[in-house]
Amino acid sequence: MVVVALIAVLTLVGGLTYAVGFRGDDPPSVTTSPSLVDENPAEDGPGLAPGPDEKKPQPVPTSGAAEKVKIGVFRGTHPDQVGEFEDWLGRDFPYAVDYSNRDYWDDVADPGYMLRAWQDTGYRMVYGVVMLPARDRTVTLAAGAAGDYDHHFRRLARNLVAHGQGDAIIRLAWEFNVSKMRWELTPEDQTDFVTYWRRIVTTMRSVPGAEKLRFDWNVNNGGETYDSTIFWPGDKYVDYVGVDVYDISWAEDTYPYPADCTGSCRRDHQVAAWANIENATYGLNFWSSFARERGKPLSMPEWGLWDRSDVDGRGGADNPYFVQRMYEFIDDPRNNVAYQAYFDVNPEDRGRHQLSGMPRSESRFRELFGR
């Protein structure tokens, strides 16, 4: 079976959750972003500051591409809280991310409370939409592939149009490559998944006023064994290759931090974790290359820090190094990131993602992504 135990653990990660193209041999113009080392790290408590044996890195070169990447945030179904985040960062957001209830078909097809909340706010919405409702045990991918559920997605498209959101980005079956929602995909599901995806996209696009809907084929980053690309539905049915990324790792010498690990020890583990995030078999570099091969822009609909008790310390907690490296990845025009959104909500009773609870990372995020 393709989805191994590691992937099952990674279900905790997701779903809680225009770049300039660079071609040719000439490098992009370079400016300077803030240093990797905080000016006054000791204020944030023991174990977080770089040690005396740690060299201060040189300023990081930037291309300016990050300025052109559309930015958004997830803060629940609360436009006012997105506005607060904009005020704090000192810039307006063109995008906002949200997820509807997903227990039954009515939740999927007619999320009226959510559509009304975002109507006339001016944000282009990025919605996580399931293929199969969570509590209806009669539904199957095969039935979806046969067209049994087309009417539900037609209804959803009509509702989006009626609420002025006919240009929304749909993260259909987001993070389908981890065991969650109503599926744990195996290679035997390939035909049904692909056929069903195509039916949904074709059905929704056929609704008058919904021609500008866009569809994000959205995986969870990482892993060494699970080849999500077998579920690619075809270039004409996908507008973005999306990757959700969190500062979490099971690789050797990453997380959890050893006892009494401070200064350069802590940084070494953060560096190793990022190397795994970026260079794993199905890490960020793989997805950047895959999107480029398919002629699609990359997106990062969910990304964030990780300080939670439900994964045995496998997150980096307050880690400005992760924020810095995410900025660098987004800023690299070769990755052609179209939009990115920070996941700024804490899961109830399970820990933290919000920047406001991680002051060093919060400061770095503001330096890099603010105006």
Image: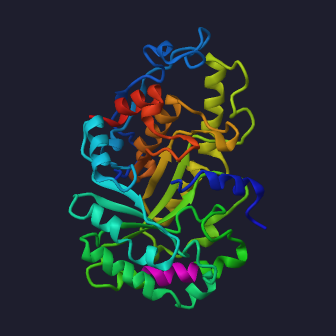
What colouring method underlies this structural image? Answer: rainbow
Measured as percent of width and height from the top left, residue 214 is found at 37, 69
- Between 56 and 362, the one lying in front of the other is 362
> Which residue, as the protein is rendered here, is positioned at the far top?
52
Q: Please say whether residue 101 is one of the residues in the magenta stretch.
A: no
Q: Position of residue 294 (x, y in %)?
A: 50, 66
Please name whichever residue, 198 or 257, is drawn nearer the observer in this view of the structure: 257
Q: How many marks?
A: 0
Against 188, residue 62 (above or below) is above
The quadrant in which the N terminus is found is bottom right
Quick check: is 196 in the magenta stretch? yes
Nearest the viewer among 63 and 93 is 93
Q: What are the residue bounds of the magenta stretch?
A: 194-201
Q: Is residue 292 visible?
A: no
Residue 252 visible in the displayed image: yes
Side (left or right) of 365 relative to 167: right
Query: What residue appears at the point 61 percent right and 16 percent down from the top-left corner?
Result: 263
Question: Which residue is most to the front?
Answer: 349
Q: Position of residue 248 (x, y in %)?
A: 62, 42
In which quadrant will I find the C terminus?
Answer: top left
Residue drawn at x 65%, y 25% is 268
- Quick check: 172 above or below 88? below
**Residue found at x 31% / y 74%:** 160
Relative to 152, say whether 181 is above or below.
Answer: above
**Position of residue 351 in the picture relative to residue 179 (left or right):** left
- Which secondary structure is most common in the magenta stretch? helix
Residue 157 image-quadrant placement: bottom left
Question: Could you say which quadrant of the image residue 260 lies in?
Answer: top right
Vertical order, 262 against 71 (above or below): above
Seen at 63% across and 84% down, the residue is 138
